[in-house]
């Protein structure tokens, strides 16, 4: 049937709609409205929680990776209470509490079971109505830690464990974490030794009970334990005890040579020379040498969690790219734990964090981590230069800077939560770490240039982080505080300086610090030893600056540079390289093909596979292998050499 669509007919229909006063529109869009949200959970108050929580953790089930928890929480009868499982975790800068691994919650009082109800909006919160005659809740639950890496970081093996107390505690809502007192204890497998910033009160029947601490300090004091354990004194007779506590997959990995111990001891001394203070009663490096438990680098005020290559000591010369880990986490005792961004500090572990100043918290820590590693002898000057070259090249090619400024990457812990990314060079990741390192190198060399070497970022570190020597009470700071501290070192328009680097879009990375430091970034066909060792440890072939891709030991691409050659040929993360110019893939064969292409106009032919689909890719590339290096510029003072030199 034909439809009359004459102009007059359309006009009459439109007029009718207009004259109806919108009745037709209202009838077609009417629908359900929202239900009111449940009452908000009470905000934390800075008042003491009455009584002491007793927290008992059985960590002896290493076969099944289960932490079994018993907890007694004093309560007031006749009230309702909300118990919280920690969600926003310090050092993670994000809501990474593993509520998915929390199980078996059972609550009793005077032998009778009490029912709980999970909050329908905040799933980390549990509501309990407390009967009148009840004075304490007896709680049981389990933390079902990962048994395989797809489930998350493995924290328990037959040889060692890493107990983070935030994963095994419930606490009452409505109080600052520093106002809640907890008496913790732990049961370990027989014969194991442990280390923690917590102080032991007693050990009996295989259970160690620690002195009561605030919930804030408990969560800030993880425990490493293991079958194979060594404890090294890093500052005999110093102002506060500092120890390196090492657990390993096997006994032979604990062998430490005298020069290695000397370098770790020098780290403590160089930190004291830099900051002129300490903010701990004692400090414990917790170091796991393992490929069975998951790696980690996590800061705490009086300790740090560090997990790295099992051959850290035994193959020292091959692991230079792991040796900035301890200096980085140690620096956080000053930067991040003592001096802390105002918007990152929270009253308890279920109040959202804001990460706007991570370019100071992590970026300057990244800077000092490499500087202290070099000043102490954990890295040679050449290794430090090679590491810096790799960082500069990465960010000089990070094309995502075109659309996303460095400042916005401080949101990544919350937005991306360290999940794998398909296009890292375009999406950007937690760039506030290493691009932040370049920013602070820029600031350091500028101060040195402006003052003819009389002052430096060392002076900022002492002025900003060195206050209140011996105090463990955190001090919070703002952007303006950073600017004011820089101006005390050397007057300059630091607001403009910082905002240009935080909010700018390039092109290229902020490399002025290299140039002012007396070096420039160049590329050659030969990788540095640092670059080669990093490739070997990561089991990859890094061709980022030639073909624009990184290939792992299974011939699969783990990274593809946005708008690089591999990208333009349709390759993605997960693509497998099957053959090169008709011959089965090996890493050396691919490198040979890149070298040979410099003498030929023929493209490099790759047979690649995605799923069950094969295709041939012809990469028209003739510029050879390219690896980053720093080259000395003789006309500029070697300020970078001065930065890396040990302090006397």
Image: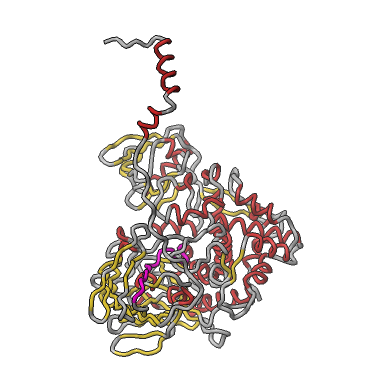
Give the position of the C terminus as an image quadrant: bottom right
Residue sitting nearer the eye, 266 or 202: 202
**603 within the magenta span:** no
Quadrant in the picture for the N terminus: top left
Residue at (49, 80) in percent of width and height: 258
| Closer to the camera in the image, 210 or 223 | 210
Is residue 383 visible in the rendered structure shown here? no
298 on left or right of 470:
left
Vertical arrangement, residue 350 with respect to residue 244, above or below: above
Give the colouring mode of the picture. secondary structure
For the stretch drawn in magenta, what is the main secondary structure?
Answer: loop
- Residue 272 on image: x %, y %: 61, 77
Residue 644: quarter of image: bottom right
Residue 622 visible in the picture? yes
| Coordinates of residue 171 in the picture (x, y in percent) | 39, 72
Residue 128 lies, with reference to residue 198, above or below; the image says: above
Location of residue 635 in the rendering, given as x and y in whole percent from the top left corner:
72, 54
Tally of numbered tags = 0
Which sits in the foreground, 175 or 521? 175
Vertical placement of 491 versus 108: above or below? above
Query: To which quarter of the image does residue 40 belong?
Result: bottom left
* Residue 424 in the figure: left or right of residue 405: left
Instruction: Where is residue 289? Give x, y as percent.
Output: 38, 71
Which residue does the image show at 48% across and 72% down from the upper left? 176
Residue 87 among magenta residues: yes
Q: Residue furthest front?
A: 20
Which residues make up the magenta segment? 78-92
């Amino acid at each position: 049937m034909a439809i009359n669509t004459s102009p007059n007919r359309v006009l009459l229909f439109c007029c009718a709609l207009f004259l109806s006063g919108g009745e037709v529109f209202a009838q077609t869009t009417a629908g359900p409205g929202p239900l009111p949200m449940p009452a908000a959970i009470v905000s934390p108050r800075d008042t003491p929680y009455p009584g002491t929580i007793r927290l008992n953790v059985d960590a002896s089930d290493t076969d099944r990776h289960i932490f079994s928890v018993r907890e007694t929480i004093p309560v007031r009868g006749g009230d309702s209470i909300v118990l919280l499982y920690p969600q926003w975790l310090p050092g993670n800068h994000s809501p990474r509490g593993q509520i998915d691994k929390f199980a078996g919650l059972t609550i009793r009082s005077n032998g009778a079971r009490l029912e709980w109800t999970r909050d329908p909006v905040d799933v980390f919160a549990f509501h309990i109505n407390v009967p009148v005659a009840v004075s304490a809740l007896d709680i049981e639950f389990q933390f079902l830690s990962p048994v395989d890496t797809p489930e998350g970081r493995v924290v328990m093996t037959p040889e060692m464990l890493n107990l983070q107390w935030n994963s095994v505690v419930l606490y009452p809502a409505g109080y600052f974490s520093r106002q809640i007192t907890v008496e913790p204890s732990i049961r370990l497998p027989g014969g194991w030794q442990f280390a923690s910033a917590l102080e032991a009160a007693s050990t009996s029947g295989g259970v160690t009970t620690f002195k009561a601490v605030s919930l804030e300090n408990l969560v800030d004091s993880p425990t490493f334990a293991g079958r194979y354990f060594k404890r090294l004194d890093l500052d005999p007779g110093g102002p506060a005890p500092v120890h390196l506590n090492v657990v390993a997959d096997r006994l032979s990995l604990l062998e430490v040579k005298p020069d290695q111990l000397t370098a770790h001891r020098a780290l403590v001394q160089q930190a004291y020379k830099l900051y002129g203070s300490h903010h701990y009663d004692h400090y414990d490096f917790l170091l796991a040498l393992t490929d069975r438990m998951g790696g980690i680098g996590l800061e705490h005020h009086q300790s740090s969690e560090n997990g790295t290559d099992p051959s850290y000591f035994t193959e020292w010369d091959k692991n230079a790219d792991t040796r900035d880990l301890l200096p980085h986490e140690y620096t956080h005792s000053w930067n991040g734990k003592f001096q802390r961004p105002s918007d990152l500090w929270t009253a308890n572990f279920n109040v959202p964090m804001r990460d706007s100043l991570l370019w100071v918290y992590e970026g300057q820590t990244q800077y000092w981590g490499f500087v202290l590693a070099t000043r102490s002898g954990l890295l040679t000057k050449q290794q430090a230069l090679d590491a810096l070259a790799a960082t500069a090249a990465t960010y000089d090619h990070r094309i995502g800077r075109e659309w996303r400024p460095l400042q916005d990457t401080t949101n990544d812990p919350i937005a991306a939560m360290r999940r794998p990314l398909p296009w890292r060079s375009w999406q950007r990741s937690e760039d506030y770490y290493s691009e932040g390192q370049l920013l602070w190198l820029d600031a350091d060399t500028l101060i040195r240039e402006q003052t003819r070497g009389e002052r430096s970022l060392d002076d900022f570190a002492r002025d900003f982080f060195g206050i209140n020597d011996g105090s463990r009470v955190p001090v919070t700071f703002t952007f303006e505080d950073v600017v004011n501290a820089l101006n005390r070192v050397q007057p300059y328009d630091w607001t403009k300086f910082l905002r240009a680097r935080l909010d700018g879009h390039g092109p290229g990375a902020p490399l002025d610090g290299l140039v002012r430091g007396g070096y420039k970034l160049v590329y050659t066909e030969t990788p540095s030893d640092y670059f080669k060792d990093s490739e070997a440890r990561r089991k990859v072939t890094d061709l980022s600056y030639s073909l624009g891709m990184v290939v792992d030991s299974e011939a699969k691409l783990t990274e593809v540079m946005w708008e690089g050659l591999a990208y333009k040929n349709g390759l993605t993360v997960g693509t497998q390289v099957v053959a090169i110019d008709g011959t089965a893939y090996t890493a050396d064969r691919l490198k040979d093909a890149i070298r040979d292409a410099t003498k030929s106009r023929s493209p490099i032919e790759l047979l690649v596979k995605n799923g069950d689909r094969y295709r041939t890719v012809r990469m028209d590339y003739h510029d050879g292998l390219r690896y980053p290096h720093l080259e000395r510029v003789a006309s500029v003072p070697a300020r970078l050499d001065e930065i890396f030199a040990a302090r006397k």
